[in-house]
Amino acid sequence: MKVCIVGASGKLGRYMVSHALERGYEVVGVCREKSVGKLSSFGDRITIVPGPTNDRRVIEKAVSGCDGVLSVLVPWGVHNYSSGTAQAVLDFAPHHARLVFSCGWHITRDGQDVYSRSLKWLLKVAGWVARLIRVVDIDDQVEACRRVFESDRRWTVVRGSDLEEGESQGLPVWSRHVGDAVLKSNITRRVDFALFMVDALKNDELVHQAPAIVGCQTPSALARHVTA
Ligand SMILES: NC(=O)c1ccc[n+]([C@@H]2O[C@H](COP(=O)([O-])OP(=O)(O)OC[C@H]3O[C@@H](n4cnc5c(N)ncnc54)[C@H](OP(=O)(O)O)[C@@H]3O)[C@@H](O)[C@H]2O)c1
């Protein structure tokens, strides 16, 4: 299995590289030129294609011959970084490839997610301020996911809860909709978010799904056994 990890140098990306290597996969990582050093601990066990992740030529080269592509969608800047990245992956990944994208709970596929009032306010205010100072464009991450949802590729969009660092607790549990009781704890270890992304490559149940995840050892995840 050959996998490309787009955004490999970030925190989520590096965890995904580790999980993929542990499974014996051949790994190609894409990251900004200035971040190549962040992958030095992997030595020659991975191939790095440096460049902006929304550069179509960079992605075309990196995904060539891959069976899976794991993409970290981040809404940096105001020049379509997320949507450009997603579009390039959709356009250039080999047809048989499993495509797995990361985002947050704020992305909704079918409008059936139920958000707390505080999250709605936070997104509104943070999104507005970030766009004003031209650092982040959350709407572009929304657009990126819209393009993925509409595509006929074999995609999965993994929607992360709040994240924390720490030892792995195991594969997160998931639900189709934010607001479902199992997700109430709203916390996942970042290392396990990465585990879910890598695991999704071989989980056909997740094709054309947008699972919202939460840590498997959180109170709301554990309570599902009691209430089931
Ligand atoms: N943080 C959270 O609480 C949270 C919650 C839910 C879901 N998520 C999702 O989880 C995923 C990873 O998020 P994360 O917060 O954990 O971050 P992360 O893994 O550290 O990833 C950040 C990524 O953004 C890149 N980046 C940073 N500054 C940039 C810039 N100015 N221009 C272009 N790229 C830049 C980084 O590349 P370099 O290495 O080159 O800097 C890295 O690939 C995202 O899809 C996010 O939506 C995050």
Image (cartoon, rainbow, N blue to C red):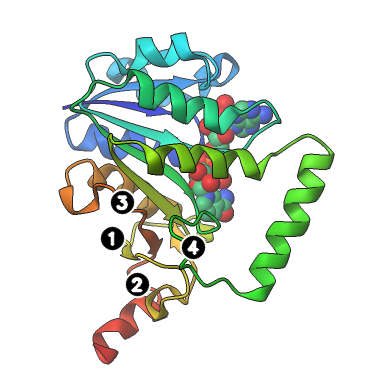
Name the element at disc 1.
loop
- Mark 4 vs mark 1, foreground winner is 4
Marked residue nearer the N-terminal end (4 or 3): 4
Q: What whole-number distance in Å separates the C-alpha atoms at marks 3 and 1?
A: 9 Å
Q: Which residue is mark 1?
A: 170
Amino acid marked by disc 1: Gly
Q: Is residue 221 above or below residue 175?
A: below
Q: Which residue is mark 2?
A: 217
Residue 3 in the image: above or below residue 146:
above
Q: What residue sits right under mark 3 in the picture?
A: 196
Left or right: 203 with respect to 138?
A: left
Q: Is residue 20 above or below residue 109?
A: above
Is mark 4 in CB contact (under 8 Å) with mark 1? no
Task: Assign ligand 1 to one image quadrant.
Answer: top right
Q: Nearer the viewer, residue 12 or 212?
A: 212
Looking at the rendered image, the disc whose residue lies closer to the viewer, 2 or 4, is: 4
Which comes before the other along the chain, label 4 or label 1?
4
- Left/right of residue 51 with respect to residue 59 in the rendered view: right
Tell me, for residue 107, which label it has, or none. Answer: none
Select label 4 or label 3 by which is in front: 4
Q: Quadrant of residue 222?
A: bottom left
Residues at marks 4 and 3, CA–CA distance in whole angstroms: 23 Å
